[in-house]
Amino acid sequence: MTKQVQSFQAETKELLDLMIHSLYSHREIFLRELISNASDALEKLKFESLTDQSLISSGHQLEIRIEVDKTKRTLSISDGGIGMTREEVVQNIGTIAHSGTKAFLKMKQEAKSNPELIGQFGVGFYSSFMVADRVTLHTQKAGTQAGVLWESDGGGTYSIEDLARPQGTGTTITLHLKEFKEKDEEGTVPDFTDTWVVKDIVKKYSDFVAYPVKMKVEQEIQKDDKTETVIEDETLNSQKALWLRSPSEITQEEYSEFYKLLSHDWTDPLKTIHYKAEGTMEFASILFIPSKKPFNYDYRDRKVGLSLYVKRVFIKGDCEELLPPYLRFVKGMVDSDDLSLNVSREILQQDRQIVRIKKALTSKILNSLKELLEGDRPAYEKFWSEFGATLKEGIAAEAGVTDKLQDLVFFHTTESKNLTTLKDYVGRMKPDQKAIYYITGESLNQVQESPYLEKLRAKGYEVLLMVDHVDAWVATSLNKYDEKPFQSIMAENLDISTEEEKKAEQEKSKEAEARLKPLIDTIQEALKENVKEVKISDRLTESPVCLVSSTQGASAHMERIMEAMGQAVPKSKRILEINASHPLFEKMFKLPRAQQEEWADILYQQALLNEGSTIPHPMQYSQKIARLMMSVSS
């Protein structure tokens, strides 16, 4: 096929600008990205050759080569990896042309398609344009004789043509380097054709890549009392898998660079967990807890999971079978000698060894988080601000880990400006307090001003303010902590009184019910379509009314969440509790029945607003409030 010129379908220049100024703070990272891509290509070829040995011919080198030419100002990275077909070149480099790219660039709206670009070949490859004004890519797919030559200056077009690669299977990327005048952060002008510069970058970023990164360098040798300069191959990286080394031999900088290679996050991880299991089950792993959420963390289609290796052979990235969903923020890898190299998704889901590895990793991560909480609370609070809501999901999702997770979760409370643990809360409980009290809602402001808190505040009882989006499920899964039961202050039969107080409240309620029975009956009749029962409240001290859920019914907060998720939830009638000591009811008692019914509806809608629900007919409510205001004598 003859040479063709094609146009990019995305805002390439915008992407390049974002990468240069936002994603990549150091130009030298381009080499790390290209070496990473080359290593991935070699891994894929090695894996494919397990079932098709013809893909690797005799003498084929699984290595990465770097060449520089000072005169032409070029730098080339070559590999003997899997290579690409013409269609794959268009698709992989065309990743940036996906419809979600513009949303990714501007981050102003949710992308229409999954823009999980960082780490895909397209963006890693395009880091080349941070240092080059023209890039050529020559590739040939393993098992074929057809090569493809791609070229672009990073503008709006690229050329592509069929051309056999002289070296055969693999890929060569040649960068025609820019002339730099401005200094980098070290105060020097980088020259990427300088052998020592290249060697330093490889050592810094890619020392642990499993394949040799080679380069021809000048070496001085002594021969017959003379010093001669010869050009020889030098392997620039150690090639030893980081996870197979002893943790005592590894620096935090090496761990950080390994994390960046795996995650394509340019910040250092918050915590590193290097774990080797030995005995009946053997595997090595390096796990990382990130410092920050990635921008696409909450995208539904975001890929999660660890990288799985078997005997140092890459098997699967984003292996979600290795960790439970509530630990999906963890990055890292696992290498096992006990698994088969021919691992399919179905086998992963059923393999007992995978289940055991998952259990061991989960336990190790939770123990490490507990150590972080107990040893460095500020760091743990930083973790919690990013991933706490995700970790909480485990309480609702897996009953078997609730006991461990209960010691790791934080909550806002009515008594503390800082987040608190359940252990801290129980330590502050009043001697006569019977339960751990909580309230759920959409925001702190909403629950902090809730009438449900009135009596508890009066008694000095602390209340957990559960406002994370997962707390509605978490609350239903928490039964006891330190033998103290959990109790919602929005449910019926709230028991916070002493026996003496109960007797006094019962007498007071009987008297109020007898006095206000006609009014209660009127309210009940007026609201029979919406409320299950109207009763005298013993939880309100200032507000006139509130709605409480029955012990069998779902809370109003849970109903709102389910509706937002598009799930039809049958509306459960709640109980309207009235504060009989509020002067409003004495005045209401003397009104004509028609006005009592109108006031009953106003109070019901106020109760809806107080619990965080929307009112069904806001215009009618506004009109009733206006009429009520007009009826007040001046």
Image (cartoon, rainbow, N blue to C red):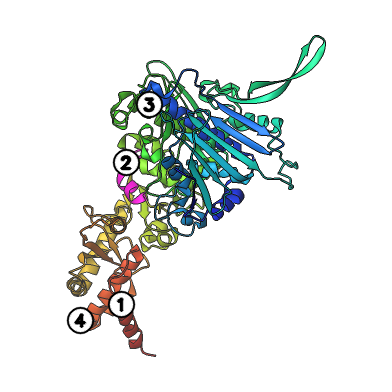
Q: Quadrant of the C terminus?
A: bottom left
Circle 1 or circle 3, nearest the eye: 3
Q: Amino acid at mark 1?
A: Tyr
**Residue denoted by label 1:** 621
Depth check: 355 or 196 in front? 196
User: Which badge, 3 or 4, comes first in the chain's sequence?
Assistant: 3
**How far across and how far down the image is residue 349, in percent?**
30, 31
Measure how far apart labels 4 and 2 are at the Cα level. 50 Å
Relative to 247, residue 397 above or below: below
User: Which badge, 2 or 3, comes first in the chain's sequence?
Assistant: 3
Relative to 422, residue 534 above or below: below
**Residue denoted by label 2:** 397
Q: Amino acid at mark 3?
A: Ile
- Asked whether the viewer can see residue 69, the reply is yes
Q: Residue at x 23, y 56 (%)?
A: 550
Stretch of the chain drawn in magenta: 470-483
Tell me, yes or no, whether the two marked residues, 1 and 2, touch with CB atoms within 8 Å: no
Residue furthest front in the image: 2
Label 2 environment density (alpha carbons within 10 Å; few <14, some 14–19, many ≥20)? some
- Dot 4 falls on a residue whose secondary structure is helix
User: Which badge, 1 or 2, comes first in the chain's sequence?
Assistant: 2
User: Which badge, 4 or 2, comes first in the chain's sequence?
Assistant: 2
Label 1 environment density (alpha carbons within 10 Å; few <14, some 14–19, many ≥20)? some
Depth check: 55 or 474 in front? 55
**Residue denoted by label 3:** 357
